Amino acid sequence: MSREIELGGNTYSIGRLSAKQQLHVSRRIAPVIPPMIPAFLKLAEKLKASGVDAPEASGAATAKLLMGGDLSDLGEALQPFADALAALNDADADYVFDNCLSAVQRRQDSGWARVVSLEQKTLMFQDMDLGVMLPLVVQVIVANLGPFIRGLLTSLPSNPDLPGQAG
C-alpha cells in the first residue's frame, strides 16, 4: 500500500502503519474525528457537485476544487476540527506526528530514506516544515485509517430525524 506524493519539491512515499500503530493513532485522534465529519460531508458535497467521486478524488483535485471555490463555508465547517486538533495535548500530537511520519520515506538520489527516526525521535530532514509534515500526516491517516473513517461516514443515517444525526 505505498503511494507517492510530491510536496515541497520532494517525492514522498506513504507507507503502512502497523496494526498496533493504527490502533494507538486512532485512539489519539478519536476526539478529532466527530468534528471532522461535517467537514468531510461538506467536502463530499462539493466534490459531488463538481462531478468528482469523493473516494476517488486525488489530493490535487480536491485542493484545486477548494481553492477555486468560496472557502468561507469550508472554513466554518473546519473550525470544530481545528478546535479539536488544538485541544490535543502535546504528547498525543507528538505521538500522532511521530508515528505517522515513521511510515513516510523521501526519495533520494541513492534510494528511499525514512523521514523520521522513532528511536531518536528526530526528523531526518531539517528542511521539512509544518507545511510538508501536516499533509504527510494527513495522507498517512487517510491511507491507513481511511476505510475505518469512511465506514463511519457512510454509516451515518441520512434522515435528520434519526438519533445520532447532527442537525
Image (cartoon, rainbow, N blue to C red):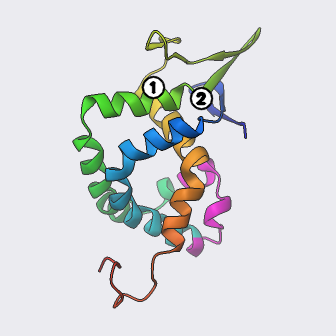
- The one nearer the camera, 71 or 107, is 107
User: Residue 163 appears in which quarter of the rendering?
Assistant: bottom left
Instruction: Give x and y (percent) for residue 99.
Output: 49, 29
Q: Is residue 31 above or below residue 128?
A: below
| Residue that mark 1 sits on | 98
Residue, x 26% and y 40% (percent of image)?
88
Asked whether the beta carbons under mark 2 and mark 1 sit within 8 Å of each other, the answer is no
Residue 65 appears in the picture as rendered: no
Residue that numbered label 2 is attached to: 103
On-image quarter of the N terminus: top right
Tag 2: amino acid: Ala
Q: Residue at x 66, y 67 (%)?
A: 53
- Residue at 31% from the left image edge and 76% from the top image edge: 166
Q: From the top left corner, tell me how far across and down residue 121 is, in percent.
A: 43, 14
Tell me, for residue 23, which label it has, or none: none
Q: Residue at x 40, y 64 (%)?
A: 37
Verify whether residue 58 appears in magenta.
yes
Towards the viewer: 57 or 151: 151
| Residue 10 in the figure: left or right of residue 23 | right
Q: Position of residue 120 (x, y in %)?
A: 46, 9
Region rendered in magenta: 48-64
Which residue sits furthest front? 20
Q: Residues within 10 Å of mark 2 (few under 14, many from 20)?
A: many
- The tag earlier along the polypeptide, 2 or 1, is 1
Q: Judging from the image, what secondary structure is the residue with disc 2 in?
A: loop
- Can residue 152 be seen? yes
Residue 89 colored in magenta in the image: no
Q: Quadrant of residue 147?
A: bottom right
**Dot 1 amino acid type:** Asp
